[in-house]
Amino acid sequence: MTLVEGHKQIAPDTAVPVWDTDPYDLEVLVDPYDWWADLRAKGDVVYIPRYSALMVGRYETTKKVFSDHENFLSSRGVGLDDFALSKPWRPPSIILEVDPPDHTKTRKVMSRAMSPKVAKALGEDFRQTADALVDEILEKGEIEAVVEFAEAFPTTVFPKAVGMTIVNKRHLVDYGAMVFNSIGPDNELRKDATTRVPEVARWIMEACDRSRLTDDGMGALLFEAADAGDITAEEASLLVRSFLSAGVDTTVTGIGNALWCLANNPAEWEALKADPSLTRPAFEEVLRYTSPVHTFCRTSGRDTEISGIPVEEGTKVICSLGSANMDPEKWGDPENFRVARKPVGHLAFGVGIHGCVGQNIARAELDAVLGALIAKVDRIEWTGDPVWRPNNAIHALDRLPLRFIAK
Ligand code: OVV
């Protein structure tokens, strides 16, 4: 069998539009908006010869594929590698890269460990840390906000919430880059990110051991589930690894992207300051407008169809969450960032049984960060040009030169 990027080469149905393009081209990754518009214009589903894969980016189709876990599997990998045919770069995640019934049990344990109640209890520490960080930033005035704000916050509060006793902020950020770049082709980005796999992955697994965790964090809740017989101790460790895989880069990106949106849209920042009840909707709009996780794949587990187009078993379907979140058919004026939009149904957290299980924690972090900004900051201004950092699955900033002016 001929493999392309670790999956079966397919013969697409003749009715599928063919688009000779690279969704993982560096220029697309750093500025995807026009490319997404082209993707949606091609049709419900397109064939990308370069990767011998189908791709979807219209809202309704993307939502449908993402919700249909029976036809579109996660257990064969959510990147371009088909785990049925090629060896994954790390032992697969037991919550992300798995289907029901195996998924059901781990999902339940993870949702309990990150319940609204847990998120609420963490809120106090999140707020204290956000207040202190914003005070520090105001003292400095001008900062590079990716490192000094976006990375600083989650790498402080999240390891603490998990109950980690050994913390290496650099390893946490680098591991996130590895995990998310691996959800894509084996291009330069993925090769660069994974050069340090043995060292960083070993550190991550060590940090996930029960002996390295406090008895009062989210990690301990997983080992309590192991004590109760819901999962094994090995599974608890792998689920701690999932916290560290999915909980750092994503929220770092959420904070960076929020600052980018607010600095670019001063009138919306004024509207948010004037009405702090818009804090939550403003974050949802940041998610819709910037899609911190822009792309995930699924694999068809049987012959099926998308919008009436036959799809053969073993087909990788590249799903552009970022494009779906900018589809004018769904959003009317998607190109406008509006803090009061309340974009219910955005796909930034995914949708269906694999929808982000940590979203309560993410929202609690952003409530704290935006709350501290609203309370203390009058203006957010550019001191230079923002720079985006290409990643096969994450739509994140690399540099945010910003000035913060106190109230
Ligand atoms: C990149 C990512 C997203 C969600 C979950 C995981 C990883 C995991 O490792 O479980």
Image (cartoon, helix red, strand yellow):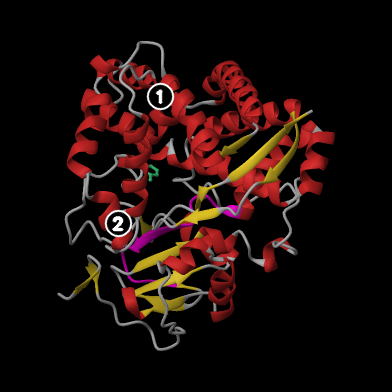
Give the residue displayed 56% in from the left and 39% down from the top: 145
For the record, the magenta segment spans 290-305
Q: Does residue 255 lie above or below 312 as drawn?
A: above
Few, some or many residues within 10 Å of mark 2 (<14, 14–19, 20+): many
The residue lying toward the viewer, choosing from 197 and 218, is 197
Residue at the limit of the structure toward the bottom, as seen here: 14
Amino acid identity at mark 2: Arg
Rounded to the nearest whole Å, what is the CA distance between mark 2 and mark 1?
25 Å
- Name the residue nearer the viewer: 259 or 406: 406
Q: Is residue 302 magenta?
A: yes
Q: Secondary structure at mark 2?
A: helix
Q: Quadrant of ligand 1?
A: top left
Numbered tag placed on residue 172 in the rendering: none
Residue, disc 2: 190
Q: Which residue is label 1 attached to?
A: 159
Query: SS class of the residue under badge 1?
Result: helix
Q: Is residue 165 above or below residue 362?
A: above
Q: In which quadrant of the rendered image does the C terminus lie?
A: top right
Residue type highlighted by circle 1: Pro
**Residue 175 highlighted magenta (yes or no):** no
Q: Is residue 123 left or right of residue 107?
A: right
Which picture quadrant has residue 196?
A: top left
Q: Which residue is painted at 55% across and 32% down in the image?
A: 360
Query: Residue 111 or 138: which is nearer the viewer?
Result: 138
Q: Residue sitting at 35 percent across and 17 percent down?
A: 220
Q: Is mark 2 within 8 Å of ligand 1?
A: no
Total tally of numbered discs in the picture: 2
Q: Residue furthest right?
A: 274
Q: Position of residue 396 (x, y in %)?
A: 50, 50
Looking at the picture, does residue 368 appear above or below residue 121? below
Residue 137: percent from left, percent from top: 61, 29
